[in-house]
Amino acid sequence: MTFDIEIKNLSLYYRQFTALNDISLNLESGRIYGLLGRNGAGKTSLLTLLATFRKVKKGSIQIDGEDPFENAAVMQHIAFHYEADYSELTENIKDMLNSAERYRPYFDRDYAHYLADRFKLPLKKPIKKLSRGMQSAFEVTLGLASRTPLTIFDETYLGMDAPAREIFYRELLEDQASHPRTIILSTHLVSEMDYLFDDVIILDQGRIILHEDYETLVSKGASITGAAEEVDAFVTGMTKLNEQELGNTKAVMVYGELADARRTEAQRKGLEVGPISLQDLFIYLTSEEARYE
Ligand SMILES: Nc1ncnc2c1ncn2[C@@H]1O[C@H](COP(=O)(O)OP(=O)(O)OP(=O)(O)O)[C@@H](O)[C@H]1O
């Protein structure tokens, strides 16, 4: 099973409202996708369709060449993890891990217990009595230990504190290296999580505005710093994301290919060329200015 995903001309409407607008996207198996978008962009809507929580009414989703909806053979290989409401759940972590083992074919019990220990989760406490952060840590434990070929995390880690999130990121990368699967991480923690992504998908107002390999994407942006007049002259005609001035020194973030010749020219003029972050690119690409350009 390759588990490649093909989304074609997918739209989703909530009555008159268009939440997803003609989305086409191919996801290759074995990669980690960062799904970014501002509040209300349509991330959860897209993920619930992928996870077969709702039926596709317009367009199509094919996973390994098949429609996954109500298709048990495919659905058992899709896991959707989100900040679930556990307020009624009386079972404890141990019970929940045992039941996950029954319906997740690749579930690794030892790894699940190792993760629960890393997150200091009390195995015998009812889930509803865990703190919010512990419930999130439990959810990511399930997500990692299930090793589901398509694993979706929709902001699952929001409740976790910074050290717990760090454990999650490390475990995710290590386990992905030994057990590759397709992972989608929907997040607003862009600067914290960018190094995890192989690919970046940006949704804006229900449309895909960008899908690119992470390295290629960040190589398209640069910050140019130096004497204000030299910087201004150098960036003329380029797409500027942001400008900052301190005395006579200016730093301008630009977006677009910067050929080697241009980089050499910058150096010759005493300008410093530095990288820019995915977060900066994301803020710019989803800004009101960029929308109406
Ligand atoms: N059940 C629903 N009925 C009507 N509108 C909905 C429903 N669910 C979502 N929407 C609307 O669809 C749009 C996309 O919502 P969605 O939850 O997919 O966004 P998101 O990118 O996940 O947002 P956030 O980052 O805030 O979680 C929003 O405008 C939202 O108000």
Image (cartoon, grey):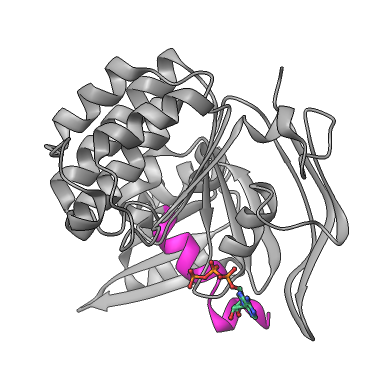
Name the one closer to the observer, 10 or 280.
10
Ligand 1 location (quadrant):
bottom right
Q: What secondary structure predominates along the stretch shown in magenta?
A: helix
Residue 280 in magenta stretch: yes
Residue 50 is situated, as x and y percent measured from the top left of the image, at 68, 48
Residue at 62%, 29% (x, y): give it: 77
What is the count of numbered marks? 0
Q: Quadrant of the N terminus?
A: top right
- Decide if residue 258 is on the left or right side of residue 224: right
Name the one closer to the observer, 258 or 16.
16
Name the one closer to the observer, 210 or 4.
4
Residue at 83%, 39% (x, y): give it: 67
Q: Is residue 97 above or below residue 70?
A: above
Residue 181 is situated, as x and y percent measured from the top left of the image, at 54, 25
Q: Residue furthest front?
A: 90
The image quarter containing residue 113 is top left
Residue 157 visible in the picture: yes
Residue 200 in magenta stretch: no
Range of the magenta residues?
278-293
Residue 240 visible in the picture: no
Q: Is residue 139 above or below residue 226?
A: above
The image quarter containing residue 44 is bottom right
Q: Residue furthest bottom?
A: 16
Residue 167 is situated, as x and y percent measured from the top left of the image, at 21, 36
Q: Is residue 205 above or below residue 81?
A: below
Q: Quadrant of the C terminus?
A: bottom right
Residue at 21%, 48% (x, y): give it: 126
Residue 242 is situated, as x and y percent measured from the top left of the image, at 42, 73
Name the one closer to the observer, 116 or 12.
116
- Decide if residue 152 is on the left or right side of residue 144: right
